[in-house]
Amino acid sequence: MRYCLPKLIVVLGLLVFGFGAQAQQTVKGRVTSGDSAVTNVTVQVKGTNQATQTDQNGDFSVAAGSGAALIFSRVGFATQEMPVGNRKYLDIHLVVSSKEMNEVIVVGYGTQKKADVTGSVASVPKSRLSELPVTNVLQAVEGSVAGVSVTNTSAVPGATPTVLIRGQNSITANSGPLIVVDGIPLSKSGGSINDINPGDIASMEILKDASAVAIYGTNGSNGVILITTKRGVTGKPVIRYSGYEGIEDLAHILKPRSAASYVQKYADFLQQTGQTQTNPVPNASELPNYKAGKTTDWIKETTRQGIIQDHNLSISGGTKDVRYFLSGEYLKEKGSIKGYQYHRASFRANLDFNLTDFLTIGTSVFVNNNDYGGGRANLLFATAMSPYGQEFNPDGTYNIYPMYPELLYTNPLIGLYQNNVNHNFNLNGTGYAEVKFSGVLKGLKYRLNAGYNYIPSAVYTYTGRNDNSPLGVATTFNSETNSYTLDNLLTYNRDFGKHHIDFTGLYSAEQRRYFVDAFSATGFINDLLAFNNIGAGATVSAASTGSGLPNGSYSDRYALNSQMARINYSYDDRYLLTLTARRDGSSVFGANTTKFGVFPVAAVGWNISNEEFMKSVSWVDNLKLRGSYGKTGNEAINVYGTITTDNSVRYPFNGISQIGVLAGNLGNSNLHWESTIGTNVGVDFGILKSRITGTIDVYSTHTDGLILKRQIPSVSGYTSVLDNLGKTKNQGVELTLTTKNVNGKDFRWESMFNFSANRNRIVDLYGDRKSDTGNVWFIGKPIGVVYDYKKQGIWQVGEDPSKQDPGSKPGDLKFADVNGDGKVTATDKVILGQTAPKWIGGMTNTFHYRDFHLSIFIQTVQGVTKNDPDLNYVDESGRRNTPADVGYWTTANKSQSRPALSYFNTRGYGYGSNASYTRLKDITLSYTVPPSLLDKAHLGSMTVYVSGRNLYTWTKWIGWDPENTYYGRGTSDWTNNYPTIRSVTVGLNITLR
Amino acid sequence: MKKNIIIGLAVSVLMMAVACKKSYLAETPYSSYSPSTLTDSLGFEAACYGLYNQMSNFLTYADHQGWPDVWQVGTDIAFATQPEGIEVPYYNYTTLISTDGAALYTWQWAYKEINNANTIIANIENPSLKGISAGNKASTDAEARFFRAYSYNMLAECFGGVPLVSKPLTGPKTDFVRASLDSVNGLCVADLTFAAANLPDIEAVKSNASGKLYGRANKYMAMQLLAEVYLRMGKGDLAEQQTQAIIGSGAFSLITARYGTKTSLPGDAFSDMFVYHNERRKEGDKEAIWVLEEENPATVPGGNTGNAQQRRNWGAGYYNITGMAICDSLGGRGISRMRLSGWVLYGLYDAGDMRNSPYNIRRRYTYNDPTQTAKFGQPVPYNNADTVYKICPHTTKWYQYDPNDVFGFAMIKDFILMRLGETYLLQAEAQVQQGKTDAAATSINALRTRAHAPQVTGSQMTLDFVLDERARELVGEENRRLTLMRTGTLVDRATKYNSNTVVYPMAGLSKTNLLLPIPQQEINLNKDAVLAQNPGY
C-alpha cells in the first residue's frame, strides 16, 4: 500500500496536464429579487470553483466560457442556474424560496442537493452553531436533532459528552458515532471533539440510516457525524470577531446537613446501632469547633465563581483563484469547583487555489492545544465533611484529616495542592488536489485527500506531603498518536436529458500508530521538584499506560484499507435511486478471516411534489418519500483483540523484582466485524409556502455478530474468549418540524421541534437465547437496564418480616419477595427500568421583533432509570455528613422511603430512580445592529447577545443532576464528580468589511 | 489525447483494483509476548516467576475483602464479626451453594496456575528444545511440576476428583469430565516425586544480586507437600518417610531463641518468627521451608500483588476507642472481620505455652494516644461491646505497619507457607495414622519443648490431639479449613468448638461441606460433557 498510492497519484497527476483550457469571456450581470438588488449572491461557474459575489448593487462580473452555466445562490433564495450561451450580460431574478429542498448538504465524500438525498441525513440547525457558550460542538447539538442522544455525563471543564445515534447496537463495543472532520476521521485518528473550535464549523450533518452511513462501511453502524469547517469565498477580506464572556455556577446544589442536623444524625446513628453516646460528634478533632460553635460550609469552601470566555478572530476572503479562511481561538473556562479549568488555543488555515481551470488544490490545517491541568478539589469529600471538621492547620495550610482520627475522608481541598499538568495538542494537516476533466469526460473529477494527524499528549502529576502522600509520588504519562488518511476519489456527475447520474468511487487507506510511556517515582526527600526530576525519587517504576495495557510503555498500530462506490441516479427530479457498497479491510479482524467485509445498501426516493398531478395542489410545496435497506458494520474489536498474548508480571525475590510472564488473552483469530441490517422509511414535506416543513423517519435495525466475551470453562486456564455472538435490534421513529407561526414585517415567530423514540432490545447473546444475569443482559430487554430488588418501603416497628425477608429489622429497606419463597434473594430481582431514554425531544422558539431576536430552547429526556449514588451511603452514613434532602428512618418519622442509619445495604441495592428531566437549556436574546447604523460605523455586521444555559430543570431526581453520572466514594472516577453548571454569558459578533 | 486519458485511467483503475500488500493489514503485537516465543532459558525463568506471581494471588486476593476468612471462620478456630460477604456461606453453610464465589475463585485460580505450569512443562519437555542443559531442564520442569501439584492438591482437597489437564490448551474446550480422585492424587505424587528429586537443596538454590533465592522452590517444599498428599491418601508410612527426610536433612531447625530485628523489645522466640523482616531464612528464620516474599511497592516496583487482607481481618480496630492511636506495636490498622473462637482463647493452651503469650495472642491494651493525657498509659477497660472487634483478643502473626500508609489497605508482609514446625505436625499425624503413638508424642514434644508447654505421652496421641496441636502452633497461619477438610474432621470439630457464637452464628454444617460445590458456572459452560456436582449441592 505504502508503495502503490504515491504511484497512483503520479499517474493521475501526469494525466491531467494534458488538458487545455477552454476560451473564457467576461460575463457581467445584476441579480434582483422583486424590486431590489440582492447583495452577496454567490455566482459560481458550474462545475468549477470559480466564483464571485454580487456587490451592493447586485452586480457581478465573472469569467466563463460560452458553454458554461452560472449558478446563483444565496441563503433564503431558490438557487438558480443560467447557461451563459453567447450573452455577455445576464439579468437574474431570484425567487425567495422554500430553501430546504434546494439546500446543498454534505453527505460524505461529496455533497448533494437535499432534494436528491435518499437516506436519512439531519443537518444541525445553524442556530445551534453560534451564540452558545459551549466548549465543544456536541454540547450544542444536545436535544436539537431527532434520533441523536447527547449526554453530558460530567460537566468537568473540557469534558466531552457521549453520543448515541438511533439507539445502542453493540453490547460491549464502542457505540459512539464516527466523527469526520473535513473528510478526516477525527476519533479514529486519535483526536477529540475538543480539538475542533466550534466557531470554525460551517455545517454539521448527521448520517443516520444505512443508506447514509454505508459509505463508511465497517465504521458506519453507529451513525456518522460530518463536520465541515468554514472556507473562504471570493471577495473582499472579511474580518470577523466573535466572543463571549460569562459566569458559571453549579446549576443545583445538593446541600449537606446543617450542623444541628448532623449532630442529631450522629445521635440517631448511635441509638439505631445500639451504641452508647459518649461524645456529641463522632471524632475527637471535631470537638473543639463543636464546643466553640464554629462551623464550616464545605460546599462554599470547595466552590467558587466560575468564569468562561471565548474569543474568535477570523479573516476570510479571496480572489478568483485563491481563497482563504484563517481563524484563531482562545477559550478559557475557570470551573465552579476550585481547581478545575480548561483552556484551549487553536488556529486554522483553510486555503483553496485554482492552479488552472481544471486543477484546484487546497489545505485544511489546524493546530489546537487543550489544557485540562491543575490540582482539583473533591466535591464528594466536601459533602462528606463534618460541619465541625477542622479545615486548616494552625499555619493556615489545609488540614489533611479534618475529622481525625477518621482517615477515610480527607480534606476536599488538599487536591488543590496536587501539581498537575494535563494537555494535548492536535496538529492536523489535510491537503487535497482536485482535477476536472472536460470534453467527453465532462463531469468526471478526481480528488486526492491526504490528511496527517500528530497528537502528543502529556499528563504529569505530583502528589506531595500536603496532599496526604508522605513519600511524594510523581507520575509522567506521554503519548503520541500519528495517523494518516489517504482518499482517492473519482466522481462523475452528469445529466443526460432527464437522467442525472452522480457516481463516487473511493480507494482509501488509513493508519494509526500509537506510543505511550508512563513512569512513576516515589520517595522524594521533599516536594520541591515535583515530576520534573523523576530520577530524584527513591523508587522509579513503570506506571500504568492504560486499562488492560502493560506498565511503562505500550505501542500499537491500526490500519484500514477500503474501496467504496456510490451511484446516485435520478430521473426528472422525481425518481431517485442510490446504490452504495463499501469494502473494508481492517487490521483488527482475525488472522483467519479475509480481513475484508462488504457493506451494500440500496435506497430509493420519490419527489411526489415534482409530479404533474401535484402541480395543482398549491398548498404542498414539497413532498418526498424515501426508503433504504442495507448492511453496515462496526469494527468493534480492539487492536490486537484477536491475538493470544502473555502478560508480563513481576515477583520479588530477595528484594529484587523479577520479570515473569503469565498467560494473558486467549485469542480468536476468526473474529470479525459486527453487522447491522437497517431499514428506513422517511417523508420530507413542506406545506403552506413552507410555513410548515418537516421530516418523519421510521427505522428498524438488526445487528448480529456482536462481539461478546464468551465464558468458557476455566479448566482451560482462561475464563473467556471473544466471539461474534450476540444480536440486538433497534426500532424507532423520529419527527422534526419547523414552523413559521407568525411571519409579519416587524414580528416573526418560528418554532423548531424534534421528537424521537427508540426501542432497543437484546435478541440473543450467546446463541442459546439465554439471558446473562451476571452482566445484567436480558433477552427481549434493552441493553442497559437497572436490575435490582423491588423496593416496597421500609420495615416498620411491629411489622413481621419473617415471611418475606427474615432477619430484617425495623428501618431496613423492605423488598418484595417476588417469587414468593418467603425470603429475599438475588432471584427476587426485577428490571426496574432502562438506562437509555425511551424518548427525547427538543423545542426552540425564536421570536424576532425588528432587530431583536429571542430564542428559547427546551430539551427533554424521558423514560430513564439510573442508580442514584446520592441515596446510597452503605455503612458510612454514621461516619460522614449526608445531604439534607436525603433523610433517614426513625421510629418517630416512620419513613417509607429512606432506611435507618443502621441499614448498611449489604445487598448492594442501587437505589434505581427516575432520571428523566426537562431542561430550559438555552435562552439567547440578541440584537442585530441595523445596516443604517453599521454603515456609519463602517461595519459589516454586528450582533450583541446575552445567553443563559441550563437555567432550570424539571425532574424528580434527588441528587446533583439527573443527566450526570455521579460516582459513589471509591468507585470509578469519583474524585471528579462535577455536576451540571448554569452559565450566563454576554457575547458580541462583529464583522469588518 | 483521448488515448492518453483512457490509458491513464486504465492504469489507475488497474492500480486501484490490485490489492495492496497483505502485510498492510497484518497485526503484530508490539508490547506483548506470545506463549510460543518464550523457549530459551530466560524465557523459562520468566515463565517460572509467573507461577509465583499467580501463587500469591491466592493469598492477596482482595476483590472480596473477606477472602482470607473463608478459610478460617466456620471452622473450630474463628468466627465472623464484621463479614464482608464472600465468607458468609462458610459459617452460614445453608447458603453454601453451587454459585459460591469463593469456590469459583479457588477453582479458577488453580486452573490458571495449572495452565501456566503445563505450558512450561510441555515446552521444556519438547524433545526439539535446544540450548538448555539437561540439569536446567530438569530443575525448571520440577519447579513447574511443584506448582502444578500444589494446585491439583488444593483442588483435590476442595473438590475431590477434578478434570485432569496436563497439557496446555490452545483453544476453548467444553467437554471436560471429572477424573477420579485417585488419578488426581497420582498426578500429584508423580509431579512431587519428580520435583523432590530434581529441585535444588535449600542452600543450592539460584542467586540474584542480593544472594540466594530462598524464596524459590527447593526440594523440601516438594517433600512436605508430598507428605500432605500421602496423608490425605491414607499413606502415613510414605508421608513419614518424607517428613523424616526433611527433619533428618538438618537443613532447618526450630527457632528456640530470640533473633532478628525486635530482640530489644519484649517478645519471645515464637513471636520473633512473625516479625516483619524476620521471616526469611536470610533474616534468620532457619525454621522456614517456604516463604513467599512480598515487598513494599513504594521501594520495590512489582513488590506485591493484590491487596492482602490478613492484617485487617485478623487485627483489631482498637483505634475506635478514644485514647487509642494506630501504632506499630499493635500491628497497624486492623478491622477484625473475624475473631478467634472461645475454644482457642480460653480452652486450647496449657499454662505457660509460649504460643499463647501476650506477644503471640494479644488480649490487653493500654491507652497509647499521648494527646489524651488523662488516660495515657492506663489499661483499657473491657466492656463487652468493645471486645467484638475493637479490642478483641487476636493473633499477632499478621502485624504490619507502614508509617507512610497508616490506613494500610494492603498488608505488605511475607507469607510463611511451610516451616519445620508444621513438618513435625505432619509427621505426628502420619505416625498416628500408622498407630505409632509414642513416636507421634515425640514429634509433638519437639514443638512443646520449644513452646515451654507440658510434654505429652503416646497415650494422648489421636488425630484430634494433632489437630489441636496444629491450632496451637499454626493458628491464623495455616489454612484451617483445608486441614479439617483433608482430615474429614470439619463437621465434628467446628460443631464441637465453635457453634456458640451469637452475632453471626454457624448454621447448616454437614458432611456435604467436606467438599466444596463444583462451580455451577463451570458445569453450565462445559456444555459438551457433564461435570458432575458433588453430592449434597
Image (cartoon, coloured by chain):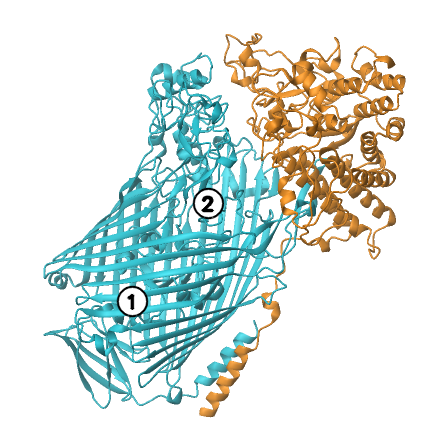
Chain colours: A cyan, B orange
Q: Amino acid at mark 2?
A: Val
Q: In the image, which disc is placed on residue A924?
A: none
Q: Which residue is mark 2?
A: A421
Residue A929: x and y, percent? Answer: 15, 58
Residue A191: x and y, percent? Answer: 45, 57
Q: Are marks 1 and 2 in contact (CB under 8 Å)?
A: no
The chain carrying label 1 is A
- How crowded pointer 2 is (Cα within 10 Å; few <14, some 14-19, many 20+) is rated as some
Looking at the image, which is closer to me, B535 or A427? B535
- How crowded pointer 1 is (Cα within 10 Å; few <14, some 14-19, many 20+) is rated as many
Q: Is A123 above or below relative to A528? A: below
| Residue A702 is at least partly visible in this image | yes
Q: Amino acid at mark 1?
A: Ser
The chain carrying label 2 is A
The N terminus of chain A: image quadrant: bottom right
Q: Is A848 above or below relative to A685? A: above
Quick check: B161 left or right of A184? right
Looking at the image, which is closer to me, A424 or A628? A628
Q: Quadrant of residue B518?
A: top right
The C terminus of chain A: image quadrant: bottom left
| Mark earlier in primary sequence (1, 2) | 1
